[in-house]
Amino acid sequence: MKQFTIALALVVFAACQVNDKTGEVQPTAKTQTATADAAQQAKEAGQEVKEGAQALGKNIQEGAKQVQESDAGKRIAEGAKEAGRGIKQGAGEAAEAAGDKLAQEGREAQAEVKKTKKQ
């Protein structure tokens, strides 16, 4: 695309005329027509790319949906849910064990205080 742009710029520059009265460089009618045609072709190519990208995106979505709805996809989703439940259960057990340990430490601290009061 970059090479096309450079080539187009060279063609446009070569197809220009210098106005004898003002000294300005002006494109010829032929160059203006060629430039307009090139711009139209670039616009059409851009539209084709856009449509192709949309079609590709749609195909990817459909493929992803098919995988999700397949037996393997359902098993993977169920496995992920089961793993989540296992992690949650493990975290609960760890919190409970920590709570039990804290309660034990609390009882021991209270017993220690009672021992020191009596002495």
Image (cartoon, rainbow, N blue to C red):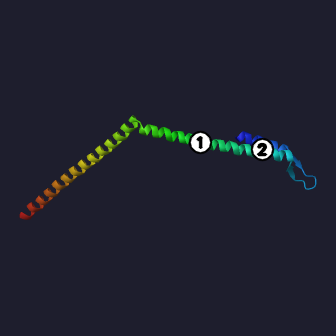
What type is the residue that disc 2 sits on? Asp
Q: Quadrant of the N terminus?
A: top right
From where the camera sits, is residue 119 visible? no
The percent position of residue 54, horizontal first and vertical second, equals 58, 43
Instruction: Please identify the quarter of the rendering in which residue 108 is found.
Output: bottom left
Pointer 1 or 2: first along the chain: 2
Q: Secondary structure at mark 1?
A: helix
Image mark for residue 37: 2
In front here: 70 or 49?
Answer: 70
What type is the residue that disc 1 sits on? Ala
The reply, left or right, for residue 118 in relation to residue 68 is left
The reply, left or right, for residue 64 in relation to residue 2 is left
Q: Secondary structure at mark 2?
A: helix
In front here: 40 or 93?
Answer: 40
| Relative to 72, residue 50 above or below | below
The percent position of residue 56, horizontal first and vertical second, equals 56, 40
In front here: 11 or 32?
Answer: 32
- Graded by Cα atoms within 10 Å as few (under 14), some (14 to 19) or many (20 or more), the crowding at tag 1 reads few
Q: Quadrant of the C terminus?
A: bottom left
CB-based contact (under 8 Å), mark 1 and mark 2: no
Q: Which residue is mark 1?
A: 53
- Taking the spot 38% from the left edge, 38% from the top edge, the residue there is 74
The percent position of residue 2, horizontal first and vertical second, equals 70, 41
Distance CA(mark 1)–CA(mark 2): 24 Å
Image mark for residue 1: none
- Taking the spot 87% from the left edge, 53% from the top edge, the residue there is 24
- Taking the spot 22% from the left edge, 51% from the top edge, the residue there is 96
The reply, left or right, for residue 113 in relation to residue 13 is left
View extreme (top): residue: 72
- Graded by Cα atoms within 10 Å as few (under 14), some (14 to 19) or many (20 or more), the crowding at tag 2 reads few
- Taking the spot 19% from the left edge, 55% from the top edge, the residue there is 102
| Relative to 108, residue 29 above or below | above
